[in-house]
Every structure is written in structure tokens, then in C-alpha cells.
Amino acid sequence: MRNRFDTTAKALKGVGDGSQLASYQVVNLGYQLNDVVVGLASGQRPLTVLMQQGTQIAQVFAGSGMGVGGVLKELGRVVVGLVSPTTLLVAGLAAVGGTALYAYNGYITAQKERQVATAGVGRAAGATVDQLNRIADSASTAGRISVAAARDMEVAFLRTGRIGVDQFGDLIAVAKNYAATTCQDIEAATKELAEAFADPAKGVDLLNAKVGGYDDRTRLLIKTLAAQNDLTAAQTTTLGRAVDRATDPTLQQRLDDFLKERANATTLGGQYVPGVMGMPAFVPARPLSAIDADIANVKRQIAEIERKAADAKADALAARTSAIAGELGRNLTPGFTDIQTLKNQQAQLALALNDPLARQKVADLKQVEDAYNAVTRAVQSWLDPAKKVQSLKRNE
């Protein structure tokens, strides 16, 4: 530390010798420049640093007799003189400060971006910036991604204006698996997930085409919930089919290694491995019972994975078949669309009437109440076309 001090002192003296400033003024200026770097690196606003250090730097030049132009020129010359190969202490501090400033600036930019997003359409998510910070920190671990990437995902979800903050953590956690399954980068996968969950009625078909697994019952439930404006329930149901493929590609290699070990044990009594200076060394074999136990264990794991893969294949086929059949059945059933539309309208009106804040914001509350009563009577008295024909015949 003493050596660094002496080196810096000599450098300051050298700068002072060629300057219009006195040596003590150059030393003082060096201290002020150091404080500027430290202040900026610690996250202070530039304007704050200017107000704090600017007056002190001005005092260094007070009484020098130089004008504004001369002061700026001399200040530049002194800074260049200080940051030289002989003043590693100051230069090192500046470098550290620059790195910290870059990282801090990135953090501040991310925070500001989320503040703006939560103030726009993203306010529908019901999230604060502090909440988003906590979610990003925890979800990044679950999703095996960086915190910065998790924060970018949150902004993408916020900008839809239709995804609740309760869904963010789970969406972040599955995004990487979804990207891998659909052969996309994380940014494209996030955008696709955001679009799918912002409009679950359409999103379920998109996800079904990409990853499968949504059978007719689940698909119809999601579409119905979305049509009834219950987005949270629709999104939660959609998320229930999240991509999660836990595979272990090393199992077959482990099995091959154990089989090779067993073959060497029975023929050679062990195996040769690289030893000192590259010379092979003989290692006695483990008991055959231990090797056989390892082989059996790996085979059980492989069999379980293959069983799950076969089950997944059958489930995916059944889901696809049910979705096609269910859609055809609804399309070919006279009047189904009419009654479903009535039920959706009834649910949407009820949602507004049951929300005190929404009731206050409706332009004509009585009109909405009358509409709800009318559609409720229509649902209760509705008859499908076939039954309606039978009823008319009986009344003839």
C-alpha cells in the first residue's frame, strides 16, 4: 500500500511540474476526480455527483487566473496525466468504476423499463416492481436462466396487459423447456408464450400444435373460461399442461460402461486404466454382485423412461383424437353454438354485476341488469332445435 501511495504521489508531482496549477492543487484535483468515479460507481445520479464535486473542483482552479477555456483545457491535461501507466491506482479505480457503472446502468434501465410497463397496459397484471424483482430472482432458479433473462420475460408478459402476475413465476419456469421443445431461442419462446397466454382461447390451439397434450375437455374448458372473461382460470388451466421433459441421456452410456466393466471382471478380473506417466495400471474388479446391482438399477430407470414415453405418446394421440372429435360433435350439433354463446354472455354480465368497482364504471347499470335477466331467462328456457320441434308438434 505504501508503494502505491509513493507511486501515485510521484505521478501527481510530475503532472504538477508541467501544469499551471500548484502541486497541492493537482493533488487536491486528483482526490476530487477519485470521488467523482466512486460516486458514479456507487450508483449516484450524475447530476448529484456534479453538484457535490463540481464546486470543489471549481475551488481548485480558484485564483489560478485562467478563464473558462483555460480551466477546461488544464483539467483535461491533468486527467490525462493522472491516468497513465505510472498511476495504476487511479486508472484501476476508474476501470472498476466504469464496470460498476455499466452493470448499474443496465440494472437501472431494467428497473425503469418495468416501471413503465407496470404503469401502462401492464397495470392489469396487478404487480409492483418490487414484486417483479422477487419473482425474477426465485423463478430464474426454477427455470435455470439468468435473473436478467427472467426480468426481460416479465416485461414481455406485462406488455400484453392480459397476464396476471400470479402466472409470471410458472411461465418463467417453463420458458426454457418450451424453447427447447419447440426449437426456438428463449426470446422467441417467451414472445410466443406471452401471446398464447394473453389470449388462451387461441393460445390453447397454438400450444396444442407445438407441444400437444390438451384433450377435448381441457381445450373446451379453456375456451369457455376465456369466452366468459375468466382469464385467470383459463390461463391457470392452460399452464397445467406445462412442458416438462425430464430425461437423462447419459443412462444408456452408464449401462454400456457397467456392461463393459462386467465383461472385464469376468475375463480379466479387472481393467487397465491410465497410470503414472501414462503407463497403464491394473485395477481389480468390483464384486460381480455390485456390478449386477448397478446394471439392474440403470435398466429399471431406462425401462421407466421408456414406459413414460409410451404413455405420453398414447396420451398425445388420445388428446388429438378427442379434440378433433369434440369439435366436430359441437359443430354438427344444432343449436350448440347458440346456447354456448348465451352462457358466455350470462357469465360476462354476471362478472361485471358482481364486481362493485365495475358496477360503478358501467355507463347504464340498469341496462346491464336487464340484459343479464333476459339472457338468464333465455338460458333457462332454451331448447335445442330437435326438442323444440317435438314441443311444437305436441302443441299442434
Image (cartoon, rainbow, N blue to C red):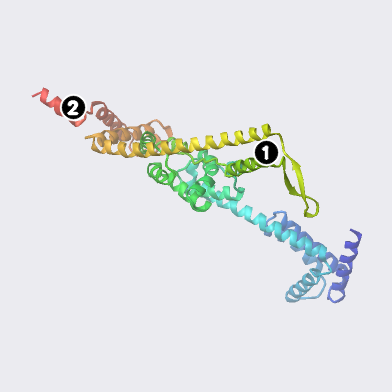
Q: Residue at x 38, y 33 (%)?
A: 351
The Cα atoms of the two marked residues, 1 and 2, are separated by 79 Å
First along the sequence among labels 1 and 2: 1
Front in this rendered view, residue 229 or 316? 316
Instruction: Tell me: residue 163, above or below residue 395.
Output: below
Residue 265 in view (yes/no):
yes
Tag shown at residue 266? 1
Q: Nearer the viewer, mark 1 or mark 2?
A: 1
Front in this rendered view, residue 380 or 120? 380
Tag shown at residue 387? 2
> Which percent across, then down, holds residue 328?
27, 39
Tag shown at residue 164? none
Are the two marked residues, 1 and 2, in contact with CB atoms closer than 8 angstroms?
Answer: no
> Which percent across, then down, holds residue 342?
28, 34
Q: Residue at x 66, y 39 (%)?
A: 262
Question: Residue furthest toward the top?
Answer: 394
Q: Residue at x 78, y 59 (%)?
A: 35
